[in-house]
Image: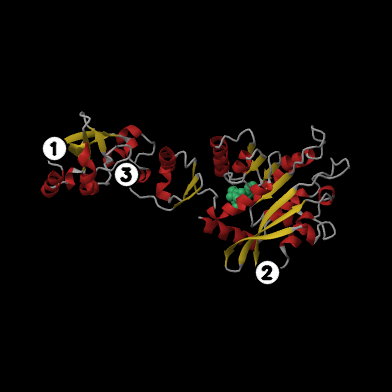
């Protein structure tokens, strides 16, 4: 423990040399002693004197700068000794002739400091460049700060919970997509099932789980999967949300397929409950291409009857330089069907947002027709590989996200 003299109100008292460079958060290392000036005065003078001393009061989290004195008729105001001078003392005395001045050591701990000053003291960098959306904070940490990512996340949670429940670094999270998430959520009701093929860290999945929607959420990226699991746990939705870590096509052929089949079975309460299976595919550069995985999906298991179609929510990018083929035409090609199976009127095509000049994100919502699920595959394996142009577009998008 060391004794620090407050240099100026609001400046950090953290013992920097004890904490700089730590990668495992050791809260005990933040303990320190600060030397403060104590102005004791009658309760009835406090209001008047406060106007004079406000600017030099000690301002630290969880430390009251106005405290009870031993005597009930007195109060104590903690001031920064570096900013108290004779002139101020004189002015205060004129307002409160019975006041007295002294000095005192105050023990400070991790609890007295804010997240920003703690992080800056440890990493030597103010760590700007993060965004906050609802309960989630996302950092884009530069290379040299990566060793501190767990510590930074822990400090943010310590200081900002319950307002912030999740901190992520550089996994996919786009705050501009909040409305998009709301739209899918609005489409799902308690009792429905949602298969999220490209779930990211769970911005659809967790709120849907909170709405008592049964969710199967998948992401191929191991970091996303890790945070998806964490978010499910923190949001207490594990009863409703099951995470998967596989390729989107594999997820469609296994998990989505079994849900489609389950929705064909009579429901236990004799059919009085209307419930819906939704499939959301939010990977705009590639989602349409992944629809080929639905071809022949029920070829060997369809037993006839009325088809309970899943409702598809498929995102894509459209450039105004190449309006052809249209997104709907691309959907038909990927499913291996034509307009008689998927007519224009059966697909709701909505604008989501402009992503760049001449490029916008759109969402297609439609009931998945049965025919593609029963037919032989019409798309060769080669066509499933993204073209060179598409590969370039994916790389550009990833760079932009970074
Ligand atoms: C645009 S983000 C969408 C995340 C989330 N649904 C949202 O709205 O914020 C796309 C996600 O797809 C994941 N992804 C990319 N390729 C994939 C694949 N082949 N299979 C499954 N997930 C994939 C990425 O890791 C990324 O998290």
Measuring from the top left, give residue 305's x and y in whole percent.
Answer: 88, 42
Horizontal placement of 314 versus 344: left or right? left
Q: How many marks?
A: 3
Which picture quadrant has residue 336?
A: bottom right
Residue tagged by mark 2? Answer: 322
- The numbered dot on residue 121 is 3
Dot 1 falls on a residue whose secondary structure is strand
Q: Earlier in the sequence, mark 2 or mark 3?
A: 3
- The numbered dot on residue 7 is none
Residue tagged by mark 1? Answer: 100
Which picture quadrant has residue 148?
A: top left
Measuring from the top left, give residue 351's x and y in whole percent.
Answer: 65, 61
Horizontal placement of 197 versus 376: left or right? left
Q: Quadrant of the image for the N terminus?
A: top left
Distance from label 2 to label 3 (Cα)?
51 Å
Q: Residue at x 54, y 43 (%)?
A: 223
Measuring from the top left, give residue 136's x and y in whole percent.
Answer: 50, 45
Is residue 198 placed above or below 65 in the rendered structure? below
Q: Nearer the viewer, mark 1 or mark 2?
A: 1
Crowding at dot 3, Cα within 10 Å, few <14 / some 14-19 / many 20+, comes out as many
Horizontal placement of 38 versus 11: left or right? left
């Amino acid at each position: 423990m060391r004794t620090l003299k407050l240099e100026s109100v609001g400046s950090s008292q953290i013992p920097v040399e004890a904490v700089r460079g730590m990668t495992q958060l050791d809260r005990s290392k933040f303990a320190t002693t600060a030397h403060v000036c104590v102005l004791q005065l009658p309760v009835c003078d406090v209001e008047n004197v406060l106007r004079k001393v406000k600017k030099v009061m000690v301002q630290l989290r969880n430390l009251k700068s106005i405290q009870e004195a031993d005597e009930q008729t007195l109060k104590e105001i903690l001031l920064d000794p570096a900013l108290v001078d004779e002139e101020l003392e004189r002015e205060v005395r004129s307002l409160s002739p019975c006041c007295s001045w002294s000095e005192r050591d105050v023990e400070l701990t991790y609890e007295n400091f804010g997240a920003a000053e703690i992080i800056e003291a440890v990493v030597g960098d103010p760590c700007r460049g993060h965004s906050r959306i609802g309960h989630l904070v996302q950092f884009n940490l530069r290379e040299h700060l990566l060793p501190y990512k767990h510590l930074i996340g822990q400090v943010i949670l310590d200081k900002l919970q319950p307002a912030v429940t999740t901190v992520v670094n550089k996994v996919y999270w786009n705050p501009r997509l909040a409305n998009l998430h709301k739209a899918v959520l609005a489409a799902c009701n308690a009792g429905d099932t949602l298969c999220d093929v490209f779930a990211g860290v769970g911005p659809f999945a967790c709120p849907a789980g909170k709405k008592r929607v049964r969710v199967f959420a998948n992401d191929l990226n191991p970091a996303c999967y890790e945070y998806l699991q964490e978010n499910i746990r923190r949001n207490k939705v594990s009863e409703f949300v099951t995470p998967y870590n596989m390729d989107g096509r594999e997820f469609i052929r296994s998990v989505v397929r079994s849900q489609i089949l389950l929705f064909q079975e009579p429901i236990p309460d004799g059919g009085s409950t209307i419930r819906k299976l939704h499939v959301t595919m939010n990977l705009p550069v590639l989602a349409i291409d992944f629809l080929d995985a639905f071809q022949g999906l029920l070829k060997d298991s369809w037993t006839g009857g009325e088809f309970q179609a899943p409702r598809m929510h498929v995102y894509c990018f459209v450039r105004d330089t190449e309006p052809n083929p249209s997104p709907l035409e691309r959907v038909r090609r990927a499913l291996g069907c034509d307009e008689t199976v998927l007519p224009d009127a059966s697909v709701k095509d909505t604008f989501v947002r402009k992503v760049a000049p001449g490029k916008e994100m759109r969402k297609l919502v439609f009931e998945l027709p049965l025919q593609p699920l029963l037919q032989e595959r019409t798309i060769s394996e080669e066509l499933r590989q993204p073209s060179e142009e598409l590969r370039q577009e994916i790389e550009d998008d990833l760079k932009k996200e970074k």
